[in-house]
Amino acid sequence: MGRMVEMRTEPKKKVVFIMGTAHCGSTLLTLVLGGHSDCLSLGEISNLPDFYRRNKPICSVCEGECSLWDQKFSDQDLQALVHGFSDRRVHRFIPLKVEKQVRRLLRADSVFNPYSLIASKVEESVLIDSTKTVWWLQKRLAAREFNENLSPYLIHLIRDGRAVMNSYSRRKQYQGLTSQQFGEQFGTLWKNRVTNENNFFDSFSGKKIRLRYEEFATNSEAITQRLCNWLEIEFQPDMLSYWKHQHHTISGNKGTRASVQRYQNDAQSNRNVGIKLNQKWQQRLSAEQIAAFYQVTDGMNKNYEW
Ligand SMILES: [Zn+2]
């Protein structure tokens, strides 16, 4: 006689999607959440296929041999993730749609359910994806895994458009423009992105929360507690010291990542690090740039001003 097997249904693992514009402070949020013992921050997982194909280290913190991506995932696993996170075809003569059906018939589950594959390899029950774009969210949430074994959570991270504008002003493509041109070009981009995000947020039927970067950066403890309640995990005060924890995130803000790297190398060198609100735009943006931005966005930033 076989022994009785006690059936127990595992609680669903969670995938938290951070949505927001570039430079909205998502790296900080990603690392704070990733400092929780039950959360694993993936970073911008959308970059995994590209990094893998170019032979670039997957982990942007370790920048080399990594105890997560190199040790817990075989090359076969990584290849499944590369296919799962991209739409690139395996064979150019088979139409993608047919190929997907064939692979489905072959039960190539890991290819279609990349987050489930990651979840099966790690102990943490919450995965954080900070890819941020609506395009990515729409594509990923359509996967079967979100109807079956995973629960999606959505954080819409918003930030004063002027702070975002300041970060964009350093990009190559905007060099040499007049204040008016830059304000208009950035404003059009920002308005479209934020409008898309708001529409997506409204249509998302799962658990969702809207969060202001500035509130998070100035009132970190209370906001992090609120996020933990929302995620149904216990608040751990230590997660606020994000630089003290191991992280294996993909991409993200260099400066924020650097504070983690410095601490891992020398715990003494990093005593001044902490969560601070960055308002450099106040010194760096000109009145003309801001005026052009407000003009082209019809004052939409009024709701986001800090
Ligand atoms: Zn790593």
Image (cartoon, rainbow, N blue to C red):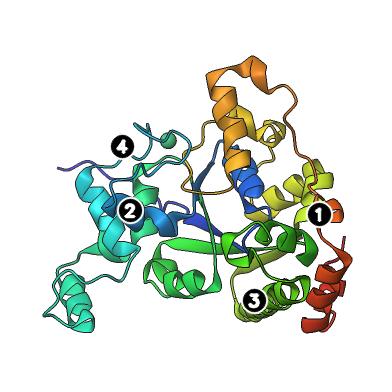
Spatial distance from mark 1 to mark 3, Cα to Cα? 20 Å
In which quadrant of the rendered image does the C terminus lie? bottom right
- The local secondary structure at tag 2 comes to helix
Spatial distance from mark 4 to mark 2, Cα to Cα? 15 Å
- Residue labelled with disc 1: 284
Task: Please report whichever mark, 4 or 1, sits nearer to the chain's N-terminal start.
Answer: 4
- Foreground mark, 1 or 3, reads 1
Q: Residues within 10 Å of mark 3 (few under 14, many from 20)?
A: few
Q: Residue at x 60, y 37 (%)?
A: 35
Q: How crowded is mark 2: few (under 14 residues within 10 Å), some or many (20 or more)?
A: some
Q: From the Cβ of disc 4, is ligand 1 less than 8 Å away?
A: yes
**Residue 169 appears at what percent x and percent y?**
69, 61
Q: Which residue is drawn at 18% across and 71% down?
A: 103
- The local secondary structure at tag 4 comes to loop
Q: Can residue 286 be seen in this view?
A: yes
Please tell me whether residue 212 is drawn above or below residue 277 in the rendered image.
below
- Foreground mark, 4 or 1, reads 1
Spatial distance from mark 2 to mark 3, Cα to Cα? 35 Å
- Residue labelled with disc 2: 117
In which quadrant of the rendered image does the N terminus lie? top left
Viewer-side residue, 228 vs 258? 258
Q: Do the residues labelled 4 and 1 touch (CB within 8 Å)?
A: no
Q: How many labels does the image show?
A: 4
Please tell me whether residue 10 is drawn above or below residue 202 in the rendered image.
above
- Residue labelled with disc 3: 189
Spatial distance from mark 1 to mark 2, Cα to Cα? 44 Å
- The local secondary structure at tag 3 comes to helix
Q: Could you tell whether 79 is left or right of 32 in the image? A: left
Spatial distance from mark 4 to mark 1, Cα to Cα? 41 Å
Q: Which amino acid does label 1 sit on?
A: Arg
Q: Is residue 233 visible?
A: no
